[in-house]
Amino acid sequence: MNTKTTVIETPAGPAQAMVLNMGPQHPSTHGVLRVVLELDGEIVLSAKPEIGYLHTGIEKSCESKTYSQCITLTDRIDYLAPLSNNLAFCLAAERLIGIEVPKRAQYIRVLLTELTRITSHLVWLGTHAIDLGAMTVFLYSFREREEIMKIYEYVSGQRMMTSYFRIGGLALEPPPDWLDRVRRVIDALPGHIDEYETLLTKNRIWWGRTKGVGYLSAADAIAMGASGPMLRGSGVAFDVRKAFPYSSYEEFDFNVQTQTAGDCYARYQVRVAEIRESIKIVRQAIDKVTPTGPFRAETPGIIPPSREEMKTSIEGLIYHFKIFTEGFAAPPGEVYQAIESPRGELGVFMASDGSAKPYRVKFRTPSFVNLQSLPKLCEGRLIADVVACIGTTDIVLGEVDR
Amino acid sequence: MESQEVSSNAAVQKLRDWDKHAVAEVIEFRGETTVVVPPQHLARAAEFLAGEPSLRFTYLSDITVVDRFPMEPRFELNYHLLSIDLGLRLRLRVRLAGLEPSVPTLTPVWPTANWHERENFDLFGIRFQGHPDLRRILMPDDWEGYPLRKDYPVEGFR
Protein backbone atom coordinates (compact mmCIF):
# COMPACT_ATOMS: atom_id res chain seq x y z
CA MET A 1 0.00 0.00 0.00
CA ASN A 2 1.33 3.38 -0.99
CA THR A 3 1.61 5.48 2.16
CA LYS A 4 2.68 8.77 0.57
CA THR A 5 0.17 11.42 1.59
CA THR A 6 -0.72 14.61 -0.14
CA VAL A 7 0.65 17.84 1.26
CA ILE A 8 -2.03 20.46 1.79
CA GLU A 9 -1.85 24.18 2.46
CA THR A 10 -3.17 25.33 5.82
CA PRO A 11 -3.15 28.78 7.49
CA ALA A 12 -0.31 27.49 9.66
CA GLY A 13 1.76 26.35 6.67
CA PRO A 14 1.94 23.14 4.65
CA ALA A 15 0.74 19.98 6.39
CA GLN A 16 0.10 16.37 5.58
CA ALA A 17 -3.40 15.36 4.59
CA MET A 18 -5.13 13.18 7.11
CA VAL A 19 -5.52 9.53 6.07
CA LEU A 20 -8.66 7.86 7.30
CA ASN A 21 -9.58 4.23 6.87
CA MET A 22 -13.27 3.88 6.28
CA GLY A 23 -14.05 0.26 6.83
CA PRO A 24 -13.54 -2.65 6.47
CA GLN A 25 -15.95 -2.75 9.41
CA HIS A 26 -17.91 0.40 8.68
CA PRO A 27 -21.67 -0.25 8.68
CA SER A 28 -22.39 1.81 5.60
CA THR A 29 -19.92 -0.10 3.42
CA HIS A 30 -22.41 -2.98 3.36
CA GLY A 31 -19.83 -5.64 3.92
CA VAL A 32 -16.11 -5.55 4.15
CA LEU A 33 -15.04 -2.71 1.93
CA ARG A 34 -12.16 -0.54 3.00
CA VAL A 35 -11.88 2.92 1.53
CA VAL A 36 -8.67 4.80 2.23
CA LEU A 37 -9.60 8.46 2.36
CA GLU A 38 -7.23 11.38 2.26
CA LEU A 39 -8.86 14.32 3.95
CA ASP A 40 -8.35 18.03 4.10
CA GLY A 41 -10.68 18.80 6.97
CA GLU A 42 -13.95 17.36 5.82
CA ILE A 43 -13.11 17.45 2.13
CA VAL A 44 -12.14 14.18 0.47
CA LEU A 45 -8.95 14.64 -1.52
CA SER A 46 -8.70 11.07 -2.68
CA ALA A 47 -10.58 7.85 -2.07
CA LYS A 48 -9.05 4.47 -2.75
CA PRO A 49 -11.23 1.40 -2.42
CA GLU A 50 -9.29 -1.59 -1.08
CA ILE A 51 -11.06 -4.86 -1.72
CA GLY A 52 -10.44 -8.57 -1.41
CA TYR A 53 -11.53 -9.20 2.18
CA LEU A 54 -14.26 -11.54 1.00
CA HIS A 55 -12.28 -13.26 -1.73
CA THR A 56 -13.21 -16.93 -1.62
CA GLY A 57 -11.74 -18.16 -4.90
CA ILE A 58 -15.06 -19.11 -6.45
CA GLU A 59 -13.57 -19.08 -9.96
CA LYS A 60 -10.84 -21.48 -8.91
CA SER A 61 -13.32 -23.75 -7.12
CA CYS A 62 -15.46 -23.95 -10.25
CA GLU A 63 -12.57 -25.52 -12.16
CA SER A 64 -12.71 -28.60 -9.94
CA LYS A 65 -16.48 -29.04 -10.01
CA THR A 66 -18.83 -30.31 -12.66
CA TYR A 67 -20.99 -27.77 -14.45
CA SER A 68 -24.03 -28.55 -12.32
CA GLN A 69 -22.09 -28.38 -9.07
CA CYS A 70 -20.93 -24.86 -9.90
CA ILE A 71 -24.49 -23.54 -9.74
CA THR A 72 -24.58 -23.60 -5.95
CA LEU A 73 -21.44 -21.48 -5.89
CA THR A 74 -23.01 -18.82 -8.10
CA ASP A 75 -25.70 -18.15 -5.47
CA ARG A 76 -23.01 -17.02 -3.11
CA ILE A 77 -21.46 -14.46 -5.42
CA ASP A 78 -24.27 -11.96 -5.19
CA TYR A 79 -26.31 -13.07 -2.22
CA LEU A 80 -28.94 -10.41 -2.79
CA ALA A 81 -29.74 -11.66 -6.28
CA PRO A 82 -28.91 -15.37 -6.31
CA LEU A 83 -31.31 -16.20 -9.12
CA SER A 84 -29.68 -13.71 -11.47
CA ASN A 85 -26.35 -15.44 -10.92
CA ASN A 86 -27.93 -18.85 -11.45
CA LEU A 87 -29.39 -17.58 -14.68
CA ALA A 88 -26.15 -16.14 -16.03
CA PHE A 89 -24.27 -19.34 -15.30
CA CYS A 90 -26.96 -21.62 -16.71
CA LEU A 91 -27.35 -19.56 -19.87
CA ALA A 92 -23.61 -19.66 -20.45
CA ALA A 93 -23.48 -23.42 -19.96
CA GLU A 94 -26.54 -23.95 -22.14
CA ARG A 95 -25.06 -21.91 -24.95
CA LEU A 96 -21.74 -23.70 -24.64
CA ILE A 97 -23.40 -27.11 -24.79
CA GLY A 98 -26.15 -26.06 -27.21
CA ILE A 99 -29.35 -26.71 -25.26
CA GLU A 100 -32.65 -25.10 -26.10
CA VAL A 101 -34.66 -24.39 -22.94
CA PRO A 102 -38.47 -24.83 -23.20
CA LYS A 103 -40.40 -21.57 -23.43
CA ARG A 104 -42.29 -22.23 -20.23
CA ALA A 105 -39.08 -22.56 -18.27
CA GLN A 106 -37.75 -19.39 -19.89
CA TYR A 107 -40.81 -17.43 -18.78
CA ILE A 108 -40.57 -18.77 -15.24
CA ARG A 109 -36.93 -17.74 -15.24
CA VAL A 110 -37.84 -14.24 -16.37
CA LEU A 111 -40.55 -14.02 -13.73
CA LEU A 112 -38.25 -15.07 -10.93
CA THR A 113 -35.29 -12.95 -11.99
CA GLU A 114 -37.52 -9.90 -12.19
CA LEU A 115 -38.75 -10.66 -8.67
CA THR A 116 -35.08 -10.87 -7.75
CA ARG A 117 -34.51 -7.43 -9.23
CA ILE A 118 -37.35 -6.12 -7.08
CA THR A 119 -36.00 -7.68 -3.87
CA SER A 120 -32.50 -6.52 -4.63
CA HIS A 121 -33.64 -2.95 -5.30
CA LEU A 122 -35.76 -3.05 -2.14
CA VAL A 123 -32.73 -4.00 -0.06
CA TRP A 124 -30.78 -1.25 -1.76
CA LEU A 125 -33.50 1.29 -1.14
CA GLY A 126 -33.86 0.39 2.52
CA THR A 127 -30.16 0.30 3.32
CA HIS A 128 -29.32 3.35 1.26
CA ALA A 129 -32.03 5.32 3.04
CA ILE A 130 -30.84 4.11 6.44
CA ASP A 131 -27.30 5.20 5.55
CA LEU A 132 -28.58 8.68 4.88
CA GLY A 133 -30.67 8.80 8.03
CA ALA A 134 -34.12 7.86 6.73
CA MET A 135 -34.88 4.93 8.98
CA THR A 136 -38.50 4.28 8.08
CA VAL A 137 -38.05 3.11 4.50
CA PHE A 138 -35.91 0.21 5.63
CA LEU A 139 -38.69 -1.22 7.79
CA TYR A 140 -41.21 -1.03 4.96
CA SER A 141 -39.00 -2.28 2.15
CA PHE A 142 -37.88 -5.30 4.13
CA ARG A 143 -41.51 -6.13 4.84
CA GLU A 144 -42.23 -6.37 1.11
CA ARG A 145 -38.98 -8.15 0.44
CA GLU A 146 -39.99 -10.83 2.90
CA GLU A 147 -43.19 -11.47 0.96
CA ILE A 148 -41.17 -12.14 -2.19
CA MET A 149 -38.71 -14.29 -0.27
CA LYS A 150 -41.66 -16.42 0.76
CA ILE A 151 -42.38 -16.98 -2.93
CA TYR A 152 -38.82 -18.20 -3.48
CA GLU A 153 -39.22 -20.52 -0.54
CA TYR A 154 -42.53 -21.79 -1.82
CA VAL A 155 -41.17 -22.42 -5.31
CA SER A 156 -37.70 -23.74 -4.62
CA GLY A 157 -37.61 -24.63 -0.93
CA GLN A 158 -35.06 -21.93 -0.10
CA ARG A 159 -35.37 -18.27 0.76
CA MET A 160 -31.97 -17.15 -0.41
CA MET A 161 -29.52 -19.66 -1.86
CA THR A 162 -32.12 -21.13 -4.15
CA SER A 163 -29.99 -22.76 -6.88
CA TYR A 164 -33.35 -23.12 -8.56
CA PHE A 165 -32.21 -22.69 -12.15
CA ARG A 166 -30.40 -25.68 -13.52
CA ILE A 167 -28.71 -26.29 -16.83
CA GLY A 168 -31.56 -26.94 -19.25
CA GLY A 169 -34.36 -25.44 -17.16
CA LEU A 170 -35.45 -25.51 -13.54
CA ALA A 171 -34.70 -27.77 -10.61
CA LEU A 172 -38.30 -28.83 -10.07
CA GLU A 173 -41.83 -28.10 -11.10
CA PRO A 174 -43.21 -25.13 -9.13
CA PRO A 175 -46.20 -25.87 -6.86
CA PRO A 176 -49.59 -25.57 -8.60
CA ASP A 177 -50.89 -22.38 -6.97
CA TRP A 178 -47.65 -20.43 -6.94
CA LEU A 179 -48.77 -17.93 -9.59
CA ASP A 180 -51.69 -16.85 -7.40
CA ARG A 181 -49.23 -16.03 -4.64
CA VAL A 182 -47.05 -14.09 -7.04
CA ARG A 183 -50.09 -12.19 -8.27
CA ARG A 184 -51.14 -11.31 -4.73
CA VAL A 185 -47.71 -9.92 -3.87
CA ILE A 186 -47.32 -8.10 -7.17
CA ASP A 187 -50.75 -6.48 -6.94
CA ALA A 188 -49.91 -5.04 -3.54
CA LEU A 189 -46.48 -3.75 -4.54
CA PRO A 190 -47.25 -0.59 -6.57
CA GLY A 191 -49.10 0.88 -3.59
CA HIS A 192 -46.13 0.14 -1.34
CA ILE A 193 -43.74 1.79 -3.76
CA ASP A 194 -45.91 4.90 -3.74
CA GLU A 195 -45.56 4.73 0.04
CA TYR A 196 -41.75 4.74 -0.16
CA GLU A 197 -41.86 7.55 -2.63
CA THR A 198 -43.95 9.72 -0.32
CA LEU A 199 -41.19 9.26 2.23
CA LEU A 200 -38.28 10.08 -0.06
CA THR A 201 -38.96 11.48 -3.52
CA LYS A 202 -39.88 14.99 -2.42
CA ASN A 203 -38.20 14.89 0.96
CA ARG A 204 -36.02 18.00 1.41
CA ILE A 205 -33.43 16.14 3.45
CA TRP A 206 -33.27 13.33 0.87
CA TRP A 207 -32.79 15.92 -1.88
CA GLY A 208 -30.05 17.59 0.10
CA ARG A 209 -28.21 14.34 0.61
CA THR A 210 -28.55 12.96 -2.94
CA LYS A 211 -29.12 15.75 -5.50
CA GLY A 212 -25.88 16.82 -7.12
CA VAL A 213 -23.96 14.30 -5.00
CA GLY A 214 -21.82 11.63 -6.64
CA TYR A 215 -21.94 13.00 -10.16
CA LEU A 216 -20.87 10.67 -12.96
CA SER A 217 -21.02 11.92 -16.54
CA ALA A 218 -22.17 9.65 -19.35
CA ALA A 219 -18.69 9.62 -20.89
CA ASP A 220 -17.09 8.75 -17.56
CA ALA A 221 -19.64 6.03 -16.88
CA ILE A 222 -18.82 4.35 -20.19
CA ALA A 223 -15.08 4.83 -19.76
CA MET A 224 -15.18 3.36 -16.24
CA GLY A 225 -17.25 0.42 -17.45
CA ALA A 226 -20.19 1.24 -15.17
CA SER A 227 -23.34 -0.69 -15.93
CA GLY A 228 -26.89 -1.09 -14.75
CA PRO A 229 -28.52 1.82 -12.91
CA MET A 230 -25.09 3.49 -12.62
CA LEU A 231 -24.93 3.77 -16.39
CA ARG A 232 -28.60 4.55 -16.94
CA GLY A 233 -28.59 7.17 -14.18
CA SER A 234 -26.02 9.00 -16.30
CA GLY A 235 -28.26 8.98 -19.34
CA VAL A 236 -26.96 6.00 -21.31
CA ALA A 237 -29.92 3.86 -22.32
CA PHE A 238 -28.10 0.54 -22.30
CA ASP A 239 -29.77 -2.54 -20.91
CA VAL A 240 -28.57 -6.05 -21.73
CA ARG A 241 -32.17 -7.25 -21.71
CA LYS A 242 -32.90 -4.95 -24.66
CA ALA A 243 -29.56 -4.94 -26.47
CA PHE A 244 -28.85 -8.68 -26.27
CA PRO A 245 -32.11 -10.34 -25.25
CA TYR A 246 -31.81 -13.68 -23.48
CA SER A 247 -34.41 -16.05 -22.04
CA SER A 248 -37.13 -14.59 -24.33
CA TYR A 249 -36.89 -11.01 -23.02
CA GLU A 250 -37.60 -9.84 -26.55
CA GLU A 251 -41.21 -10.98 -26.05
CA PHE A 252 -41.75 -8.72 -23.07
CA ASP A 253 -42.84 -5.12 -23.21
CA PHE A 254 -40.86 -2.86 -20.91
CA ASN A 255 -38.95 0.40 -21.05
CA VAL A 256 -35.32 1.09 -20.26
CA GLN A 257 -35.34 3.65 -17.47
CA THR A 258 -32.86 6.48 -17.71
CA GLN A 259 -32.14 9.77 -15.99
CA THR A 260 -29.69 12.34 -17.22
CA ALA A 261 -28.63 14.03 -13.98
CA GLY A 262 -25.97 11.38 -13.19
CA ASP A 263 -26.15 11.98 -9.43
CA CYS A 264 -27.31 9.84 -6.51
CA TYR A 265 -30.85 11.12 -6.88
CA ALA A 266 -30.94 10.10 -10.55
CA ARG A 267 -29.83 6.61 -9.68
CA TYR A 268 -32.49 6.50 -6.97
CA GLN A 269 -35.11 7.46 -9.57
CA VAL A 270 -33.83 4.87 -12.03
CA ARG A 271 -34.00 2.07 -9.47
CA VAL A 272 -37.47 2.97 -8.26
CA ALA A 273 -38.68 3.16 -11.86
CA GLU A 274 -37.04 -0.20 -12.53
CA ILE A 275 -39.03 -1.79 -9.73
CA ARG A 276 -42.19 -0.59 -11.47
CA GLU A 277 -40.95 -1.92 -14.83
CA SER A 278 -40.16 -5.26 -13.23
CA ILE A 279 -43.70 -5.45 -11.88
CA LYS A 280 -44.88 -4.92 -15.48
CA ILE A 281 -42.67 -7.75 -16.71
CA VAL A 282 -43.77 -10.08 -13.91
CA ARG A 283 -47.43 -9.42 -14.79
CA GLN A 284 -46.74 -10.34 -18.43
CA ALA A 285 -44.82 -13.41 -17.37
CA ILE A 286 -47.69 -14.61 -15.18
CA ASP A 287 -49.91 -14.58 -18.26
CA LYS A 288 -47.32 -16.38 -20.38
CA VAL A 289 -46.54 -19.22 -17.98
CA THR A 290 -48.86 -22.09 -18.74
CA PRO A 291 -50.08 -24.22 -15.81
CA THR A 292 -48.60 -27.36 -17.33
CA GLY A 293 -45.75 -28.08 -19.66
CA PRO A 294 -42.07 -28.97 -19.54
CA PHE A 295 -39.93 -27.20 -16.96
CA ARG A 296 -36.66 -28.38 -18.41
CA ALA A 297 -35.26 -29.54 -21.70
CA GLU A 298 -35.05 -33.18 -22.61
CA THR A 299 -31.47 -33.93 -23.52
CA PRO A 300 -30.54 -37.42 -22.40
CA GLY A 301 -27.14 -37.55 -20.76
CA ILE A 302 -27.14 -33.86 -19.87
CA ILE A 303 -30.50 -33.10 -18.30
CA PRO A 304 -31.44 -35.52 -15.52
CA PRO A 305 -34.46 -37.72 -16.30
CA SER A 306 -37.63 -37.29 -14.26
CA ARG A 307 -37.92 -39.18 -10.97
CA GLU A 308 -40.57 -41.35 -12.57
CA GLU A 309 -38.33 -42.27 -15.47
CA MET A 310 -35.33 -42.79 -13.25
CA LYS A 311 -37.23 -45.31 -11.16
CA THR A 312 -38.92 -47.20 -13.96
CA SER A 313 -36.49 -47.40 -16.87
CA ILE A 314 -32.97 -48.73 -17.00
CA GLU A 315 -31.77 -45.93 -19.35
CA GLY A 316 -33.19 -43.35 -16.98
CA LEU A 317 -31.32 -44.88 -14.06
CA ILE A 318 -28.06 -45.04 -16.00
CA TYR A 319 -28.34 -41.42 -17.11
CA HIS A 320 -29.28 -40.29 -13.62
CA PHE A 321 -26.29 -42.10 -12.16
CA LYS A 322 -23.86 -40.83 -14.78
CA ILE A 323 -25.03 -37.22 -14.61
CA PHE A 324 -24.73 -37.04 -10.82
CA THR A 325 -21.43 -38.89 -10.53
CA GLU A 326 -19.31 -37.77 -13.46
CA GLY A 327 -21.33 -34.94 -14.99
CA PHE A 328 -21.42 -34.31 -18.71
CA ALA A 329 -18.86 -33.08 -21.19
CA ALA A 330 -19.23 -29.77 -22.99
CA PRO A 331 -17.70 -29.19 -26.42
CA PRO A 332 -14.40 -27.28 -26.40
CA GLY A 333 -14.81 -23.56 -26.90
CA GLU A 334 -15.49 -20.31 -25.11
CA VAL A 335 -18.65 -18.30 -24.55
CA TYR A 336 -19.36 -15.00 -22.85
CA GLN A 337 -22.93 -14.68 -21.67
CA ALA A 338 -24.09 -11.41 -20.15
CA ILE A 339 -27.35 -10.72 -18.36
CA GLU A 340 -28.76 -7.61 -16.77
CA SER A 341 -28.52 -8.35 -13.07
CA PRO A 342 -30.01 -5.83 -10.62
CA ARG A 343 -26.59 -4.22 -10.41
CA GLY A 344 -25.67 -4.20 -14.07
CA GLU A 345 -23.99 -6.36 -16.64
CA LEU A 346 -23.26 -9.72 -15.09
CA GLY A 347 -21.14 -11.69 -17.53
CA VAL A 348 -20.05 -15.28 -17.35
CA PHE A 349 -17.09 -16.28 -19.45
CA MET A 350 -16.80 -20.01 -19.72
CA ALA A 351 -14.03 -21.95 -21.39
CA SER A 352 -14.32 -25.66 -21.95
CA ASP A 353 -11.62 -28.14 -22.91
CA GLY A 354 -14.13 -30.88 -23.66
CA SER A 355 -14.18 -32.42 -20.19
CA ALA A 356 -16.97 -32.58 -17.62
CA LYS A 357 -15.59 -29.65 -15.64
CA PRO A 358 -15.30 -26.09 -16.85
CA TYR A 359 -11.71 -25.28 -17.75
CA ARG A 360 -12.13 -21.69 -16.69
CA VAL A 361 -15.08 -19.70 -15.42
CA LYS A 362 -14.90 -15.97 -15.04
CA PHE A 363 -17.61 -13.87 -13.48
CA ARG A 364 -17.65 -10.33 -14.77
CA THR A 365 -19.47 -8.89 -11.82
CA PRO A 366 -21.08 -5.45 -12.04
CA SER A 367 -20.24 -4.54 -8.43
CA PHE A 368 -16.53 -5.01 -9.03
CA VAL A 369 -16.53 -2.73 -12.04
CA ASN A 370 -18.98 -0.16 -10.67
CA LEU A 371 -16.92 0.23 -7.52
CA GLN A 372 -14.07 1.48 -9.66
CA SER A 373 -16.01 4.71 -10.22
CA LEU A 374 -16.18 5.44 -6.48
CA PRO A 375 -13.18 7.80 -6.43
CA LYS A 376 -14.75 9.75 -9.30
CA LEU A 377 -17.99 10.06 -7.36
CA CYS A 378 -16.68 11.30 -4.05
CA GLU A 379 -13.38 13.09 -4.60
CA GLY A 380 -13.65 16.77 -3.81
CA ARG A 381 -16.80 16.29 -1.79
CA LEU A 382 -17.57 16.06 1.91
CA ILE A 383 -16.86 12.93 3.90
CA ALA A 384 -20.58 12.48 4.58
CA ASP A 385 -21.15 12.18 0.84
CA VAL A 386 -18.86 9.15 0.66
CA VAL A 387 -21.59 7.19 2.45
CA ALA A 388 -24.14 8.31 -0.13
CA CYS A 389 -21.76 7.43 -2.96
CA ILE A 390 -21.02 3.93 -1.67
CA GLY A 391 -24.71 3.34 -1.15
CA THR A 392 -25.67 4.52 -4.59
CA THR A 393 -23.20 2.24 -6.39
CA ASP A 394 -25.18 -0.64 -4.84
CA ILE A 395 -22.26 -2.98 -4.32
CA VAL A 396 -22.43 -6.45 -2.87
CA LEU A 397 -19.03 -7.29 -1.50
CA GLY A 398 -19.45 -10.97 -2.15
CA GLU A 399 -19.72 -10.05 -5.78
CA VAL A 400 -16.84 -7.60 -5.73
CA ASP A 401 -14.41 -10.12 -4.30
CA ARG A 402 -15.88 -13.41 -5.49
CA MET B 1 -12.99 -23.37 -36.28
CA GLU B 2 -10.58 -21.08 -38.08
CA SER B 3 -12.10 -19.21 -40.96
CA GLN B 4 -10.74 -16.71 -43.39
CA GLU B 5 -14.08 -15.94 -45.02
CA VAL B 6 -16.21 -12.94 -44.26
CA SER B 7 -17.20 -12.95 -40.61
CA SER B 8 -20.72 -12.07 -39.53
CA ASN B 9 -19.16 -9.51 -37.23
CA ALA B 10 -18.71 -6.19 -39.03
CA ALA B 11 -15.69 -5.30 -36.93
CA VAL B 12 -13.55 -8.12 -38.29
CA GLN B 13 -13.50 -6.85 -41.85
CA LYS B 14 -12.90 -3.27 -40.69
CA LEU B 15 -9.98 -4.45 -38.61
CA ARG B 16 -8.55 -6.41 -41.54
CA ASP B 17 -8.91 -3.46 -43.91
CA TRP B 18 -7.15 -1.26 -41.41
CA ASP B 19 -4.17 -3.56 -40.94
CA LYS B 20 -4.19 -7.15 -42.10
CA HIS B 21 -1.31 -8.00 -39.77
CA ALA B 22 -3.47 -7.12 -36.75
CA VAL B 23 -5.72 -10.11 -37.38
CA ALA B 24 -3.86 -13.37 -36.86
CA GLU B 25 -6.92 -15.58 -36.66
CA VAL B 26 -10.69 -15.31 -36.48
CA ILE B 27 -12.66 -17.81 -34.40
CA GLU B 28 -16.42 -18.12 -34.60
CA PHE B 29 -18.11 -20.18 -31.93
CA ARG B 30 -21.75 -20.14 -30.82
CA GLY B 31 -22.34 -16.81 -32.54
CA GLU B 32 -19.41 -15.10 -30.87
CA THR B 33 -16.46 -13.69 -32.73
CA THR B 34 -12.94 -13.87 -31.40
CA VAL B 35 -10.15 -12.01 -33.14
CA VAL B 36 -6.67 -13.17 -32.24
CA VAL B 37 -4.31 -10.23 -32.31
CA PRO B 38 -0.50 -10.49 -32.17
CA PRO B 39 0.67 -8.92 -28.88
CA GLN B 40 2.68 -6.22 -30.63
CA HIS B 41 -0.45 -4.96 -32.40
CA LEU B 42 -2.76 -5.05 -29.36
CA ALA B 43 -2.50 -1.43 -28.22
CA ARG B 44 -2.90 -0.09 -31.76
CA ALA B 45 -5.83 -2.37 -32.53
CA ALA B 46 -7.54 -1.37 -29.27
CA GLU B 47 -7.15 2.31 -30.10
CA PHE B 48 -8.53 1.72 -33.57
CA LEU B 49 -11.56 -0.23 -32.36
CA ALA B 50 -12.40 2.32 -29.68
CA GLY B 51 -11.84 5.34 -31.88
CA GLU B 52 -13.13 4.26 -35.30
CA PRO B 53 -16.38 6.25 -35.75
CA SER B 54 -18.20 3.40 -37.51
CA LEU B 55 -17.43 0.91 -34.71
CA ARG B 56 -17.04 2.79 -31.43
CA PHE B 57 -16.10 -0.05 -29.13
CA THR B 58 -16.00 2.46 -26.30
CA TYR B 59 -17.02 0.00 -23.61
CA LEU B 60 -14.71 -2.65 -22.25
CA SER B 61 -16.80 -5.26 -20.46
CA ASP B 62 -14.12 -7.50 -19.15
CA ILE B 63 -10.57 -8.77 -19.37
CA THR B 64 -9.96 -12.35 -18.50
CA VAL B 65 -7.20 -14.91 -18.85
CA VAL B 66 -7.24 -18.59 -19.64
CA ASP B 67 -4.18 -20.55 -18.58
CA ARG B 68 -3.47 -23.32 -21.11
CA PHE B 69 -0.67 -24.87 -19.06
CA PRO B 70 1.37 -26.82 -20.14
CA MET B 71 0.70 -25.71 -23.71
CA GLU B 72 2.66 -22.87 -25.25
CA PRO B 73 1.81 -20.04 -25.71
CA ARG B 74 0.45 -20.56 -22.26
CA PHE B 75 -1.81 -17.59 -21.56
CA GLU B 76 -4.80 -16.37 -23.50
CA LEU B 77 -5.94 -12.86 -22.68
CA ASN B 78 -9.52 -12.15 -23.66
CA TYR B 79 -10.77 -8.59 -23.96
CA HIS B 80 -14.54 -8.40 -24.18
CA LEU B 81 -15.47 -5.27 -26.07
CA LEU B 82 -18.89 -3.79 -26.51
CA SER B 83 -20.12 -1.18 -28.91
CA ILE B 84 -23.19 0.33 -27.25
CA ASP B 85 -24.10 2.24 -30.43
CA LEU B 86 -23.98 -0.81 -32.69
CA GLY B 87 -25.11 -3.37 -30.14
CA LEU B 88 -22.11 -5.47 -31.06
CA ARG B 89 -19.71 -7.54 -29.02
CA LEU B 90 -16.21 -8.58 -29.98
CA ARG B 91 -13.58 -10.58 -28.20
CA LEU B 92 -9.95 -9.68 -28.73
CA ARG B 93 -7.51 -12.39 -27.84
CA VAL B 94 -3.80 -12.17 -27.26
CA ARG B 95 -1.65 -15.24 -26.71
CA LEU B 96 1.29 -14.89 -24.36
CA ALA B 97 4.21 -17.16 -23.57
CA GLY B 98 4.41 -18.67 -20.10
CA LEU B 99 7.73 -17.08 -19.15
CA GLU B 100 7.27 -13.53 -17.86
CA PRO B 101 4.03 -12.86 -19.67
CA SER B 102 3.63 -9.18 -20.33
CA VAL B 103 1.46 -7.01 -22.50
CA PRO B 104 0.95 -3.22 -22.77
CA THR B 105 -1.74 -1.76 -20.56
CA LEU B 106 -4.97 -0.61 -22.19
CA THR B 107 -5.88 1.87 -19.44
CA PRO B 108 -5.26 4.85 -21.77
CA VAL B 109 -7.92 3.50 -24.14
CA TRP B 110 -10.39 2.17 -21.54
CA PRO B 111 -9.85 3.49 -18.00
CA THR B 112 -11.96 0.63 -16.69
CA ALA B 113 -9.13 -1.73 -17.65
CA ASN B 114 -7.31 -0.56 -14.52
CA TRP B 115 -8.93 -2.98 -12.07
CA HIS B 116 -9.34 -5.77 -14.61
CA GLU B 117 -5.61 -5.68 -15.30
CA ARG B 118 -4.82 -5.56 -11.62
CA GLU B 119 -7.00 -8.62 -11.11
CA ASN B 120 -5.24 -10.54 -13.85
CA PHE B 121 -1.87 -9.47 -12.52
CA ASP B 122 -2.96 -10.65 -9.07
CA LEU B 123 -4.38 -14.01 -10.06
CA PHE B 124 -2.33 -14.93 -13.14
CA GLY B 125 0.84 -12.89 -12.86
CA ILE B 126 0.46 -11.11 -16.17
CA ARG B 127 2.51 -7.90 -16.27
CA PHE B 128 0.77 -4.94 -17.84
CA GLN B 129 3.45 -2.52 -18.97
CA GLY B 130 2.69 1.10 -18.24
CA HIS B 131 -0.13 0.35 -15.81
CA PRO B 132 -0.51 3.28 -13.37
CA ASP B 133 -0.98 1.18 -10.23
CA LEU B 134 -0.11 -2.48 -10.76
CA ARG B 135 -0.71 -3.98 -7.31
CA ARG B 136 -2.52 -7.05 -6.09
CA ILE B 137 -6.21 -6.37 -5.75
CA LEU B 138 -7.97 -9.43 -4.32
CA MET B 139 -5.15 -11.32 -2.61
CA PRO B 140 -3.08 -9.86 0.26
CA ASP B 141 -0.10 -7.76 -0.82
CA ASP B 142 2.41 -10.30 0.51
CA TRP B 143 0.83 -13.33 -1.17
CA GLU B 144 3.16 -15.63 -3.05
CA GLY B 145 2.18 -17.20 -6.33
CA TYR B 146 -0.71 -16.65 -8.69
CA PRO B 147 -3.75 -18.63 -7.52
CA LEU B 148 -5.67 -18.99 -10.76
CA ARG B 149 -2.78 -20.52 -12.67
CA LYS B 150 -3.29 -24.16 -13.48
CA ASP B 151 -0.09 -25.23 -11.71
CA TYR B 152 -1.38 -23.70 -8.46
CA PRO B 153 -3.22 -26.35 -6.42
CA VAL B 154 -6.87 -25.72 -5.57
CA GLU B 155 -6.22 -26.19 -1.86
CA GLY B 156 -3.12 -23.97 -2.03
CA PHE B 157 0.51 -24.83 -1.28
CA ARG B 158 1.00 -26.49 2.08
Image (tube, coloured by chain):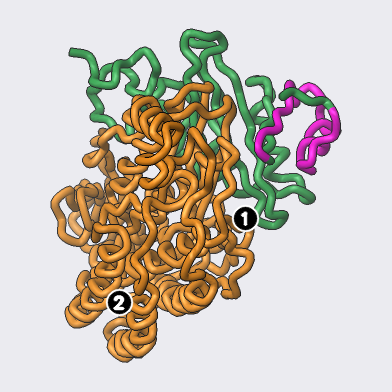
Q: Earlier in the sequence, mark 2 or mark 1?
A: 2
Q: Which mark is residue A244?
A: 1
Task: Please give left or right for residue B43 compared with residue A107 in the image.
Answer: right
The number of callouts visible is 2
Say whether residue A263 is magenta.
no
Chain where mark 1 sits: A
Amino acid carrying mark 2 in the image: Arg
Say whether residue B13 is magenta.
yes
Which colour denotes chain A? orange
Mark 1 Cα-neighbour bin, 10 Å: few <14, some 14–19, many ≥20: some
* Coordinates of residue A146 in the picture (x, y in percent): 23, 72
Residue situated in front as seen by the camera: A359 or B124: A359
Q: Is residue A208 above or below residue A110?
A: below
User: Residue A211 sits in which quadrant?
Assistant: bottom left
Q: Which mark is residue A209?
A: 2
* Coordinates of residue B80 in the picture (x, y in percent): 58, 39
Residue situated in front as seen by the camera: A9 or A208: A208
Amino acid carrying mark 1 in the image: Phe
> Which residue occupies 22% across, 74% down?
A142
Spatial separation of the CA atoms under disc 2 and disc 1: 35 Å
What span is in magenta? B5-30
Q: Is residue B41 above or below residue A150?
A: above
Can residue A259 be seen at all in this image of the molecule? Answer: no
Of the 4 image quadrants, the one containing the C terminus of chain A is top left
Which colour denotes chain B? green
Q: Is residue A237 above or below residue A372?
A: below
Tell me the element at label 2.
Answer: helix
Task: Please give left or right for residue A245 compared with residue A56 in the image.
Answer: right
Tell me the element at label 1.
Answer: loop
* Coordinates of residue A285 in the picture (x, y in percent): 50, 72
Camera-side mark, 2 or 1: 1
> Which residue occupies 42% across, 37% down?
A313
